[in-house]
Amino acid sequence: MSEETSNGIISEDQAVELLALFVSSAQLLMHEPAHYGPLRLLTATERLSAMMLEKATEETRPFLELAIERIPQMHVQMSDVPAYKAGLEELNAAIGDCLVRRAGLEEGASQ
Amino acid sequence: MSNAVLDAIRKRRVVREMTDEPVTQAQLEQILEAGRWAPTGGNMRQNRFVVVQDEKIKGLIYQVAPGMFQRPPVIILICTDLGVARAHQISDDSLTFPMDVGKAAQNMALAAHSLGLATGPVTSFSQSAVSRILNLPESFVPHMFICLGHAAEVSQFNVRPWQRITWRDLTYYDRFPSDSGGG
């Protein structure tokens, strides 16, 4: 693992926005359909990606850009299971690549 | 023969991406009046509308409304005033209330559509957080936001039709046959 990056990646205001999303989602999910759970996690991923984008390192940026572009499409693909599943695979492959880049193991990352 | 009401019912859509273009006060008041004319159970008139246009307050609502994807110029919150209902000895959990909210919401959506505006309903929000943010009276129960504005021309939220259905797919006449699983 590379040395910890400490670049003030999000502000306290942005962090509080995410906290509000987490706790309001937790309350709503008590009575919402089960598949809304992953939807809320993806919403949080998209918002955090947008918050991080400006200050993110080059290793992280590709994942953030993909999340911002791809997740809004996935919100309307939940009824299309193969498309939704493909989106999840794409995002997870991308976060895997991101982790590899950040660990300095680029040769193991698929481009 | 064309019928404006039926055309509006057929053509109205939920809009999840809106522009910054403002809604005029005259348009807003026409839409609120359409909500006012929605019927309520027992003609109790317990629906209450809270109009939110302040950018800061809209931003706070957005943060506790995971189902809100729009950033609309106007948000209308439809509430039930339980104080009115209690005066009629109606219990706080009466099903009348969400149904009456739905009727007002549909009236508003159709009125907005007829004025060339777009709407999107949002019920995925924290009622307790919204009550605090808007400092709602204790008797007000927030049920549904109506996001109101102008539709963005290009939307990434165009949901593909799941399956074409007609009213025939949804409708039954008279009594179900004995093999239908009814009691």
Image (cartoon, coloured by chain):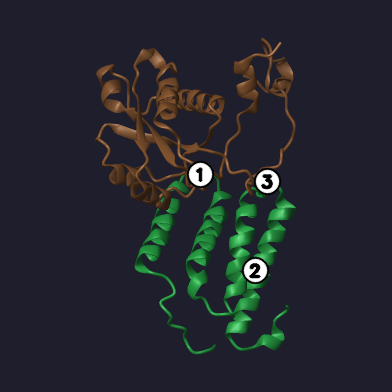
Is disc 2 placed on a helix, strand or loop? helix
Q: Say which label, 2 or 3, has the lower sequence index.
A: 3
Q: Tag 2: residue type?
A: Asn
Is disc 1 placed on a helix, strand or loop? loop
Residue found at x 58% / y 36%: B14
Task: Return the chain for callout 2.
Answer: A
Is disc 3 placed on a helix, strand or loop? loop
Residue B155 placement (x, y as % from top left): 63, 46
Task: Return the chain for callout 3.
Answer: A
Distance of mark 3 from mark 1, alpha carbons? 16 Å
Picture colour for chain B: brown
Q: Name the residue under label 3.
A: A79
The disc at residue A58 is: none
Q: In which quarter of the image is residue A17?
A: bottom left
Residue B41 placement (x, y as % from top left): 40, 16
Residue found at x 54% / y 79%: A57
The disc at residue A92 is: 2
Q: Tag 3: residue type?
A: Ser
Distance of mark 2 from mark 1, alpha carbons? 25 Å
Picture colour for chain A: green
Q: Tag 1: residue type?
A: Glu
Labels 3, 1: front one: 3
Q: Mark 1 points at which residue?
A: A32
Mark 3 on the same chain as mark 1: yes
Mark 2 on the same chain as mark 3: yes
Task: Return the chain for callout 1.
Answer: A
Q: Quadrant of residue A82?
A: bottom right
Residue B131 placement (x, y as % from top left): 31, 42
Quadrant assignment for the N terminus of chain B: top right
Distance of mark 2 from mark 3, alpha carbons? 20 Å
Residue found at x 61% / y 33%: B13
